[in-house]
Amino acid sequence: MKLVFLDRLTLGVDISLDEFNQFGEVVVYDTTKPTETLTRVKDADIVITNKVVIDKEIMDNSHIKLVCIAATGMNNVDLEYAKEKGIIVKNVAGYSTNSVTQLTFSYVFHFIQKLNYYTSYVNDGHWEKSEIFTHIDKPFFELKDKNWGIIGLGNIGENVAKIAQSFGCNVSYYSTSGNNKNTNYLQKDLETLLKESDIVSIHCPLNETTTNLLNKTNLPLMKNGAILMNLGRGGIINEADLASIIDTKELYCGIDVVTKEPIEVESPLLKVQSKNRLVLTPHIGWASVEARKELIKLIIMNIQEFVK
């Protein structure tokens, strides 16, 4: 049996793939361009892809039996045609809950504790010249009694809610599907949640309902000094609208996902002038060492199940 990895770099070079050798020949490509995909998978039995597209043309001109998606999202594979062709497609889920939650709180602590300001104060030599032992010119705040609104109360959102509550936050949520009836937390409509929250974190998928969910109409509803974070998918927040409001209002934003990844040179988020109000990270929320090891483990389990 032949296994082909199409975009190994997305898993990190520090993660071993040795366990896959138990299934047969393993061929690894760090990255794969669309024009290279067919040649590379033509004689493969199993294909492992994170973001490389497997479409009708690829399936018609190869003998792939199993596609393992090294992620939860499955939009890079034509699922309906795979079903027609009898090709099994397996994704993985639940591996990154703790990792995404951790980045969520990293953003919050960065902003609420004003860490940029205070580390710069020390690094620039001001503390050593101070006449007193401390310096508290930039007010910072506690999480206790802050209103934390969550958009998308799935596994990750609920994990964030639980930890936020342990810090003494008042947690509420907005259900993007309208189907979540979780009674552990107060459910609000989107406008109310945005108006009343000191912190808003996004953990929902991107779909027709959530595309441009936050935009120039509702972003101004947020409080001055509020923290907004997107750890769901790019496109949930209109990036041009967000960039504009960051420069006109005191809104602090942690953004891990953007509409087109890697981020484009012309992205409005790279043009923001108030850079102290924006932290951009390159889609790392899912990617702690532990999460990636769990991801590999789940892919192997999917292949083992297929082999049996």
Image (cartoon, rainbow, N blue to C red):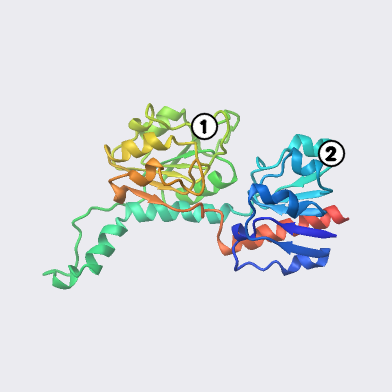
- What's the residue at 36%, 55% (across, down)? 110
Residue 178 falls in which quadrant of the image? top right
Answer above or below: position of 38 versus 195.
below
SS at mark 2?
helix
Give how far across and how far down residue 289 sits, in percent. Answer: 58, 64
- Looking at this view, name the residue that lies furthest to the bottom: 128
Give how far across and how far down residue 224 sits, in percent. Answer: 28, 38
Give how far across and how far down residue 108 sits, in percent. Answer: 39, 51
Q: Is residue 92 visible?
A: no
The mark total stands at: 2
**Residue to which mark 2 is pinned:** 85
Answer above or below: position of 261 versus 213.
below
Name the mark on residue 211.
1
Residue 246 falls in which quadrant of the image? top left
Nearer-N-terminus badge (2/1): 2
Q: Real-space Cα distance between discs 2 and 1? A: 31 Å
- The disc labelled 2 sits on which kind of residue? Lys
- Judge from the rendering whether residue 114 lies leftward or rightward of residue 48; answer left or right: left
The quarter in which the N terminus is drawn is bottom right
- Judge from the rendering whether residue 80 lies leftward or rightward of residue 241; answer left or right: right
- Is the C-beta separation of discs 2 and 1 under 8 Å? no
Give how far across and how far down residue 187 sits, in percent. Answer: 50, 32
- What's the residue at 19%, 66% (across, down)? 134
Q: Is residue 230 visible?
A: yes
Badge 1: residue crowd in 10 Å (few <14, some 14–19, many ≥20):
some
- The disc labelled 1 sits on which kind of residue? Thr
- What's the residue at 26%, 58% (across, down)? 117
Q: Nearer the viewer, residue 21 or 166?
A: 21
The quarter in which the C terminus is drawn is bottom right
In front of the other: label 2 or label 1? Answer: 2
